[in-house]
Image (cartoon, rainbow, N blue to C red):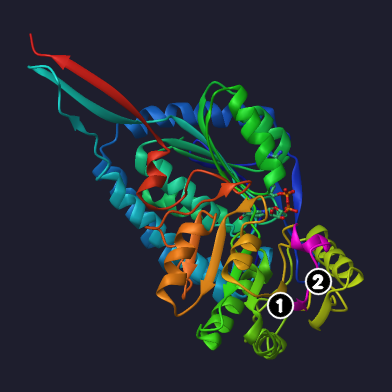
Amino acid sequence: MYPNTQLYINGQWQDAQSGDSLAVINPATEQEIGRVAKAQIADLDQALQAAAQGFEVWKATAAAERAKIMKKAAHLLRERANDIARIMTLEQGKPLKQAKIETLSAADVIEWFAGEAVRSYGQVIPSRQQDVHSYTVKTPVGVVAAFTPWNFPINQIVRKMSAALAAGCSIIIKGPEETPASPAQLIQAFHDAGVPKGVVNLVYGEPAEISAYLIPHPVVGKISFTGSTPVGKQLAALAGQHMKKATMELGGHAPVLIFKDADLDVAVSEMLASKFRNAGQVCIAPTRFLIEREVYDQVVEKIKQQVEALKVGSGLDDGVDVGPMIHARGYANIQKLIRNALDKGAKLVCGGHALEGKGYFMQPTVLKDVPFEADCMDKEPFGPLVLCRPFDSYSEAVAEANRLSFGLAAYAYSRSNKVCLDLGRDIQSGMLTINHVGLGFPELPFGGLKDSGYGTEGGSEAINAYFDTRLVTVAAR
Ligand code: NAD
């Protein structure tokens, strides 16, 4: 049974004042499975007022008490993970197992930030004058407006929300209209854990209308967006005009550097598991597989064998590795990118086609010898597509890895200490993981460089984005 989703404002679930709603489509069947309330300005005004009042209450709540409520929400989420995962799979398409992992890891994120809440210290600064005491205090930035996408319906929210709540901020979340019901379950866990009314608010509607209203609004102190680079640039510009703090987690086009001395089996199996998670609709998904020429054919063959063994189907079915893509737009886009690459001279290793019948199912696809003229070498595929190219030297591999304006995640495999350390210096990305897949844990910074955005959503850096650091200096007279 899939639930309809209302707006959550001032501690209650309610329909939009206009009564308007949007359809929610199951991407595995293309059928409407439910509705989500569509907020308009009157609803947003209510949410802003609630969040302003919620902020006054929450910032005055002791950090230890905030942490306690957060930990209780994490506990409830774990207890409810099976039911929540099923809802997520129905609306998002990802295999049930992945949906459950997402839900459980959201609980870890909440707990980790709850730990940060009670350890957010200021500094005492040694003074150059006698009897002068200088120190910094961290105060929450205020009401946060967060805009999150559909690929990780819970996790994209929980990172922003946990850091904001730990810091003492209140939040208005514009959740993903494609996948509204699993985020609602996250909010319900916080409601049941006792978060005061107004501290958390969840709205859905027309994304551009909502961001255009919330970002300039004087009640809002900070914004955080996860989504595509073009939209991120628009929202960052608007935030800049109104001098709002902003965190931008945007697109990527991750390179994977596989050197000839690497453990090739580990490299291939880890990279393919990451690539096809969530049908490749992941900002940090490995995309450009750059393989040292001596082992190129061998690695491409290993990739082919493993990719051909992947099972595509409804996320509710047992043993499915790759679910449907989220919407017709992404589905059409990946097919267009594959056609364009083949026209430009890339060679098809496997896959290449959409599955027949209902649902946005795409065969996991591998292309090799992809020329730079192919659009997919520059544009984020955001789907189940692997691009392979050979390289002849370290400097050629690094130059290609750094060629694009994106700089989010990068991956590498080599048994040479020198190569690993040099890559740490040379690769221009916010995150680099070498000889394992080690991204996305709550304690690790998560963020990009260049067109992939700014700010970070994990680690101790993340909570700082929700604080103002103020100086107080006192002469004892
Ligand atoms: P899109 O740009 O239309 O939407 C991406 C997200 O941004 C959605 O959640 C959407 O609701 C939101 N959005 C769009 N316009 C907005 C606005 N004016 N104000 C506030 N929010 C707005 O793209 P899409 O077709 O849904 O997804 C494809 C692209 O989005 C991908 O190529 C990828 O770059 C990006 N994306 C990135 C992530 C990520 O994790 N960084 C997640 C999802 C999508």
Asked if marks 1 and 2 touch (Cβ < 8 Å), the reply is yes
Residue at 42% in and 41% down: 164
Q: Which residue does the numbered mark 2 point to in the structure image? A: 359
Task: Give the amino acid at mark 1.
Answer: Ser
Q: Which mark is residue 314?
A: 1
Q: Residue at x 67, y 84 (%)?
A: 296
Q: Between residues 477 and 196, which one lies in front from this camera angle?
A: 477
In the rendered structure, does residue 405 fall within the stretch colored magenta?
no
Judged from the image, the secondary structure of the residue bearing numbered disc 1 is loop
Residue 350 visible: no
Give the x, y percent position of residue 75. Answer: 36, 62
Q: Is residue 115 above or below residue 220?
A: below
Q: Position of residue 463 (x, y in %)?
A: 38, 43
At a point 68% along the width and 71% down the height, the residue shown is: 279
Q: Nearer the viewer, residue 311 or 40?
A: 311
Marks 1 and 2, how far apart in space?
9 Å
10 Å crowding of disc 1: few (<14), some (14-19), many (20+): many
Q: Position of residue 174 (x, y in %)?
A: 61, 42
Reply yes or no: does residue 369 show up in magenta: yes
Residue 248 rendering spot, x and y as whole percentages = 57, 43
Q: Quadrant of the C terminus?
A: top left
Q: Who comes first in sequence, dot 1 or dot 2?
A: 1
Identify whether 66 is placed above or below 210.
below
Q: Name the residue type under label 2.
A: Gly
The answer to whether residue 50 of the structure is visible from this angle is yes
Q: Quadrant of the N terminus?
A: bottom right
Q: Note whether ligand 1 is within 8 Å of mark 1.
A: no
Which residues lie in the magenta part? 364-378
Q: Secondary structure at mark 2?
A: loop
Along the viewing direction, whichever of 329 and 409 lies nearer the viewer:
409
Image position of 466 (left or right of 44):
left
